[in-house]
Image: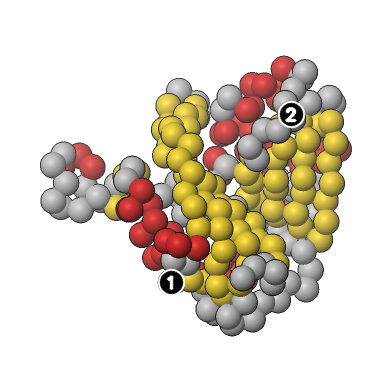
Amino acid sequence: MFLSRLTLDLRDRAVRHDLANPYELHRTILRAFPDAQAGGPGRVLFRVELPRAGVEVVLVQSDQEPLWGRLPTGYLAAHQTKPLAGLAFRAGQRLSFRLRANPTKRAGKSTPDAHWIGKRVGLCREVDQEGWLSRKGEVGGFRVTPESFRLIPEGKVLARKGGQSLQFQAVRFEGVLTVTDPERFLQTLRDGIGSAKGLGFGLLSVAPAEGLP
């Protein structure tokens, strides 16, 4: 895997256009990877970081090494890519993490509007969002508790795909997790968490947390 840090040039009209529509941002990012005829891009996850000092930064995690020179001229102010080879974790290891996610559930038969039965619906209550992350950890090889992370609501995210308008509930999770199953956790890290991964959700970032009490 590879992790890239892209600094976007806000003076560029295409950048401003893409930041207003994550679907288009995803399409632009994919230009750096092989198309379907060349074998496809593999898994590509990305996350727009919270802006600091007027600088827009996008993190991109990919199976294949990107060629950022394929992006439009003037789109990037700077970029860095590093390989994530040799990643290994151990059971009981504690890691700092960040995740921007779209917590959802499948609407059941008790849903008042039968139109939504079987479809994904957003989880809006914090207690439901916390429970969602806990369940994802149970199947994803890690454990979190409500005391080990904080939840930052980011509100609705709008996207346009063709003539269709899409809406997502964005939540940022930050804190400390504990690895329970190293092999499953590594797969979770590669695959991402939750839905709408092509729209800037699901990238799980981790860092050592040995210094934590």
Looking at the figure, which quarter contains the N terminus? bottom right
For disc 2, the neighbor class at 10 Å (few under 14, some 14 to 19, many from 20) is few
Q: Quadrant of residue 26?
A: top right
- Whether residue 197 is visible, yes or no, is no
Looking at the figure, which quarter contains the C terminus? bottom right
Where residue 36 appears, x then y in whole percent? 67, 48
The structure residue drawn at horizontal position 55% and vertical position 67%, both measured from the top left corner, is 177
Where residue 166 appears, x then y in whole percent? 43, 31
In the image, which is nearer the foreground, mark 1 or mark 2? Answer: 2
Location of residue 166 with respect to 82 vertically, above or below: above
Tag of residue 16: none
The structure residue drawn at horizontal position 70% and vertical position 54%, both measured from the top left corner, is 62
Give the amino acid at mark 1. Answer: Glu
Real-space CA distance between mark 1 and mark 2, rounded to the nearest whole angstrom? 37 Å
- Whether residue 149 is visible, yes or no, is yes
Q: Which residue is mark 2?
A: 53
Give the amino acid at mark 2. Answer: Ala
Residue lying furthest bottom: 91
The structure residue drawn at horizontal position 83% and vertical position 56%, both measured from the top left corner, is 82
Tag of residue 138: 1
Q: Indicate left or right for 14 with 26 as reference.
A: right
Instruction: Give the colour scheme shown.
Output: secondary structure
Looking at the rendered structure, the secondary structure element under dot 2 is loop
